[in-house]
Structures are given as C-alpha cells and as structure tokens.
Amino acid sequence: MLLVPFDPIGKNISEWLYGHAADRPAHLSVEWLEGCPSGGGASYAGTVEGLDVYTTQLPAERSWLFSKTTLRSVSYARLQSGNFVDVVFEEGEDSRKSRLRVRFRQSTAWNDTPIIEIVLRDRIRAKPVPAEAPAS
C-alpha cells in the first residue's frame, strides 16, 4: 500500500484514470478496482502496477509505503458528549468564513512491520526568506 499526498501524486493518478487515454503513461498499468476501502482520512486513488495507492494529508514531497497487513485496526471511542462524532457549525461574520467543526477520537493499532518513508527532495519547498525592512 502506498500513501501519497493528493497534490501532486493523487491528482496525477486521478487524471490518468479519468482523462484522455493518450495522456496516460504507456509504461504503467493504472486501474480503478471496485470495492477498495476508502475514507476516514485516506481515499483510494487507484492501483498502479498492482500497488494500491491512497491519498491523504501528507506534505507534497512525502509518501509512505507499507504492507496491507501493517495496519491492524482503527477504532473510535465515545466523546464526553456520549457521541462518537460531534459536529458544530460556527457562523462567521461573512458566510464564506463560517466553519464546520468535527470532533472524534480515533486510535490505530499497527503490526511491527517496516514502513518506508519516501522523500522526493526536488519537491521540498524552500522556506520563504523574510524581506528586509525598507531603509528609512
């Protein structure tokens, strides 16, 4: 299983699957398999060369590769409210600044197998250099 950031990798896979066939890499097998689990912070993007690829919130330069048996379970616990999920709408002064806050308590159990972190050094964003104050 490969976890990748949506932008750019997941976006590319989506374009390969749903775009023009001529735009797909000819040397790669890219397919969409029905019934692959998705959701809960990671979305199934497709299968590339037999490897299931999921998108999640990772920095653009990082991906994680691990066995499907590495993640043993995901569980949810009740919040103080007694609910598994609390949802609150916070209205902003401008409707475009309103927010929907979702709270939940999630825990995971992992098997002791390797997780390989892939770092694409050419995608690491340079930190902005602060501008010098104008001379008075």
Image (tube, helix red, strand yellow):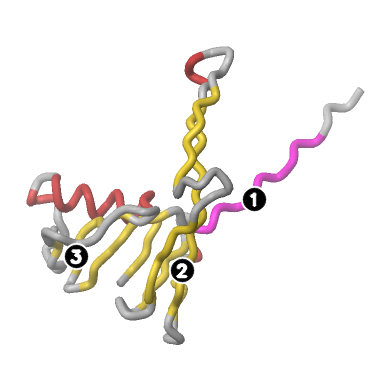
SS at mark 3? strand
Residue numbers of the magenta segment: 123-132
Quadrant of residue 40 within the rendered picture: bottom left
Q: Is residue 7 left or right of residue 81?
A: left
Magenta highlight: main SS: loop
Q: From mark 2 to mark 1, how far is it between C-alphas?
A: 33 Å
Q: Residue at x 24, y 68 (%)?
A: 52
Residue density around tag 3, few if under 14, some if 14–19, many if 20 or more, within 10 Å: many
**Above or below: residue 19 compared with residue 46:** above
Numbered tag placed on residue 80 in the rendering:
none
From the top left corner, tell me how far across and down residue 7 is, in percent: 38, 49
Q: Earlier in the sequence, mark 3 or mark 1?
A: 3
**Above or below: residue 131 compared with residue 12:** above
Residue density around tag 2, few if under 14, some if 14–19, many if 20 or more, within 10 Å: few
From the top left corner, tell me how far across and down residue 47 is, in percent: 19, 65
Tell how many labels.
Answer: 3
Q: From mark 2 to mark 3, how far is it between C-alphas?
A: 24 Å
Q: Residue at x 37, y 77 (%)?
A: 66
Question: Which residue is identified by label 1?
Answer: 127
Q: Nearer the viewer, mark 2 or mark 3?
A: 2
Numbered tag placed on residue 47 in the rendering:
3
From the top left corner, tell me how far across and down residue 27 is, in percent: 14, 68
Q: Amino acid at mark 1?
A: Lys
| Quadrant holding the C terminus | top right
Question: Which residue is identified by label 2?
Answer: 108
Residue density around tag 1, few if under 14, some if 14–19, many if 20 or more, within 10 Å: few
Q: Amino acid at mark 2?
A: Thr
